[in-house]
Image (cartoon, rainbow, N blue to C red):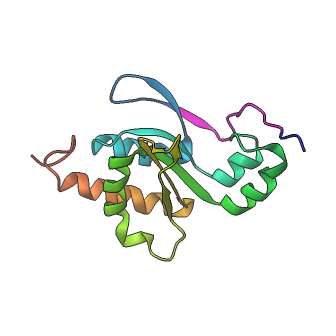
Amino acid sequence: MTTEYTEPVQVHPTAELVTPAGEHVQVDTGMVDLVTALWRKGFTTLQCCQDVGAGIAGGGCMYPVERRERYAAYWDGFAWLKMLTGHMERLMDLAAPIVAGNGWEATVPILSGRLVGFANLRYPSWQTAELVGLVEAASRNDPESENGSA
């Protein structure tokens, strides 16, 4: 059996944002509020998707073509966020009140026998606004955050 891959394509509508480092990036519109809240809190984001299932079904990921339908069905309605591992650990602490029982999955890949420096989070996309609220509340209460009350 030959495994067929295609180059990923952008599936969801995007908005152009400027990272804290000054780089211009495209972010799925459904993730803009979360990404900007995370940046204000001092987190580094690497990639994101507002609906992984739709992204996979539309060819937005490097899954083999013959497996896309299965993975798309599994991740339907889940958002994806890729961050530095330490930042993901902090985010999961902030998100603790809304994680239980909702299928959240945070993973750190192992490549060449070593943990990589990033983590992936998949969570129900309907919880994005709740997550934004938790991050923003933490920023208001943290003098180290860009928007903290120093």
Give above or below for 35 relative to 123: above
Residue interval drawn in magenta? 4-15
Q: Residue furthest left?
A: 150
Main SS type for the magenta part? loop
Residue 122, x across and y down, in percent: 54, 57
In the displayed structure, does residue 52 sit left or right of residue 99?
right
* Magenta-span inclusion, residue 145: no
Give above or below for 120 relative to 96: above
Picture residue at 75% right of the left edge, 40% below the top: 59
Q: Residue 91 appears in which quarter of the rendering?
A: bottom left
Picture residue at 41% right of the left edge, 70% below the top: 98
Q: Residue furthest right?
A: 1
Image quadrant containing the N terminus: top right
Residue 25, x across and y down, in percent: 49, 28
In the displayed structure, does residue 101 sit left or right of residue 73?
left
Residue 105, x across and y down, in percent: 51, 62
Q: Name the residue nearer the viewer: 106 or 116.
A: 116
